[in-house]
Amino acid sequence: MEQTLRVLELYSGIGGMHYALRESGMAAEVVAAVDVNTIANDVYMHNFPCTPLWPKTIEGIMLEELNKLAFDMILMSPPCQPFTRIGLQGDMSDSRAKSFLYILDILPRLLRLPKYILLENVKGFEASSARDLLLQTLENCGFKYQEFLLSPTCLGVPNSRLRYFLIAKLQPESFSFQTSSRILAEFPNPEGTGLHKHSVAMNLDKDFPSVPTKGTEMKDNPSTQYSGKGTFLFKLETPEEVERKKTQDNDFSIQTLQAFLEDDAEDVSQYFLPPKSLLRYALLLDIVKPTSRRSTCFTKGYGHYVEGTGSVLQSAKDVEMESVFKSLETLSEEEKLRRLSTLQLRYFSPREIAKLHGFPPEFSFPDKTTVKQRYRLLGNSLNVHIVAKLITVLLS
């Protein structure tokens, strides 16, 4: 009889790790989920009412409490702000890294070490001192590990969300593949050495479009410093950027966005961009169509801020974007708005982003959760399919 794994879910958020565990098909039970975010906890309890949820800081958990749980696996996604490219990159000096450092301190002192660990974080974590301390702690405790930088595109999902992952297994158990000191950009083949035959080669930088994020101006962003007339095409995109997007849209190993869009059952009119946003940010928008096979990373500011927070969808089917943007800057605001409105640009709904993140149809938000809160929670979440695949690799 297969033994049921006892799983501790730290930084549980809205339950992405829990859903990944289910998707993996492994016999497992989450014996405790821990998160301090009250809104995220409401969503978690709404979807997993039978799972013990500890609404407390991780530093507030005593060693004795952890020992009583007798868990076999830790799933965790520590705060990414100390390591993100647009943050202060305070690394271990950032107060938000305190809980993660507490985990690394308490891990060697557990009565019984877990057999398995899976960690997710933002790209940039791999260059941090926190990551170095993590690897050192794992080695001291007798773990073997493998690191990854993976995006949902490697599973055919049309969304770029490049993230750092680590899977670790307590020796003498060994992985079903040859581990490497390199950070892998594809899944390993569980049946032997090498990379998984269905993995899609990816550009590790394509998650980061060259439009400036909120709080930065064009002149402050090296990737947008161009000179000379005609450098940009009909909007603030270089020929190279346009060609990259065409290449992505012609990659038939990736699904189209249409498969992730809501049907007519949901009223999408509330997600249309307001006139003020259209006029101010039109040239900076990353616009995709239902037939596109790409979308940029959705952040927690999506739906509230416009620049660099995620793609917007062109709902109009028979309107050419180039004809709309051609000579746009020379028009009056009234005419400019009239022309932009023909594209019928809207934000992706929270439900659509959840689908792109791999959350199953049964996932839902409590009615009291606002749209802004839903975007924020999803922007802080992870891709369920990638974690499920890594759990399978870890336990195979």
Image (cartoon, grey):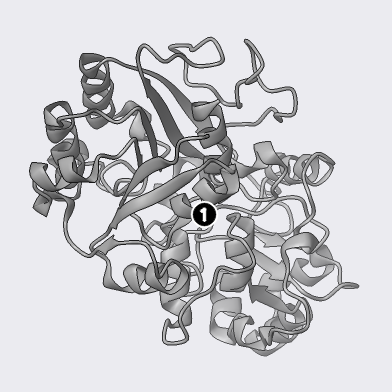
Q: Quadrant of residue 268?
A: bottom right
- Above or below 179: residue 6: below
At 80% from the left and 39% from the top, the residue drawn is 253
- Position of 8 with respect to 339 (left or right) is left
- Above or below 204: residue 32: below
At 27% from the left and 21% from the top, the residue drawn is 138
User: Residue 382's spot in the image, x, y percent?
Assistant: 48, 51
Identity of the residue furthest to the front in this view? 1
- Above or below 77: residue 350: below
**Which quadrant does the C terminus fall into?**
top right
User: Residue 350's spot in the image, x, y percent?
Assistant: 56, 71
User: Residue 28's spot in the image, x, y percent?
Assistant: 46, 45
Element type where label 1 sits in the image = helix
At 60% from the left and 54% from the top, the residue drawn is 358
Dot 1: few (<14), some (14–19), or many (≥20) neighbours within 10 Å? many
Q: Which residue is mark 1?
A: 19
Depth check: give the residue in front, 20 or 197. Answer: 20
Name the amino acid, label 1. Answer: Tyr
**Can residue 6 be seen?**
yes
**Can residue 285 be seen?**
no
At 16% from the left and 40% from the top, the residue drawn is 67
